[in-house]
Amino acid sequence: MHWTEIARRTVGGVVVLDLHGQMTLSGDQEFRLLHQVQRALDEGFRHIVVNLASVAYLDSTGVGEIVGAYTRVVRTGGMLKLCCVSARTEELLRAANIDSVVHWFATESAAVESF
């Protein structure tokens, strides 16, 4: 994956992961989102919001990482939700039928409150 950074913060017992940059295939194949999700799960958090407001571009590899993160969270009894999804990203998620499984919200506050 190629991105500028992932910032993590906690809002009322919910871990919010702010992604910045791009979620695309790169040479290093380091799955940072999965690492951050696993870290939150290891710390006992079960509610995670992935904030895509600053994601400039997402390809099928990025979609795959979101699905992997979602699966990992659900298997531990938790829930992962997305927020601030761009129109282009929403189109990709719908094309992959992810919208029937992963819920997303227009704002971070709406996603956090949904828990």
Image (cartoon, rainbow, N blue to C red):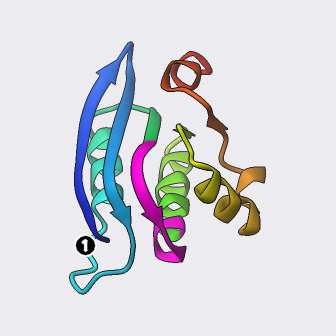
Residue at 39% over, 73% down: 24
Q: Residue at x 75, y 68 (%)?
A: 95
Q: Residue at x 24, y 86 (%)?
A: 27
Magenta residues, start to end? 52-63
> What residue is rendered at 59% in x and 20% in y?
110
In depth, the one of 23 and 30 nearer the eye is 23
Q: Position of residue 109 (x, y in %)?
A: 51, 18
Image quadrant holding the N terminus, namely: bottom left
| Foreground pick, 86 / 40 | 86
Q: Is residue 96 magenta?
A: no
Q: Which residue is mark 1?
A: 30
Dot 1 crowding, Cα within 10 Å, few <14, some 14–19, many 20+: few
Question: Could you tell me residue 82's position as x and y percent?
Answer: 54, 41
From the viewer's perspective, is residue 101 above or below residue 8?
A: below
Q: Is residue 102 left or right of residue 21?
A: right
Does residue 75 lie above or below 8 as drawn?
below
- Residue 54 lies in magenta, yes or no? yes
- The three-letter amino acid code for the residue at tag 1 is Glu
Place of residue 40 in the rendered image (x, y in percent of width and height, measured from the top left): 31, 39
Residue at far bottom of view:
27
Disc 1 is placed on an element classified as loop
- Number of numbered labels in the structure image: 1
- Residue 83 vertical placement versus 33 (above, below): above
Asked whether 95 or 54 is in front, the reply is 54
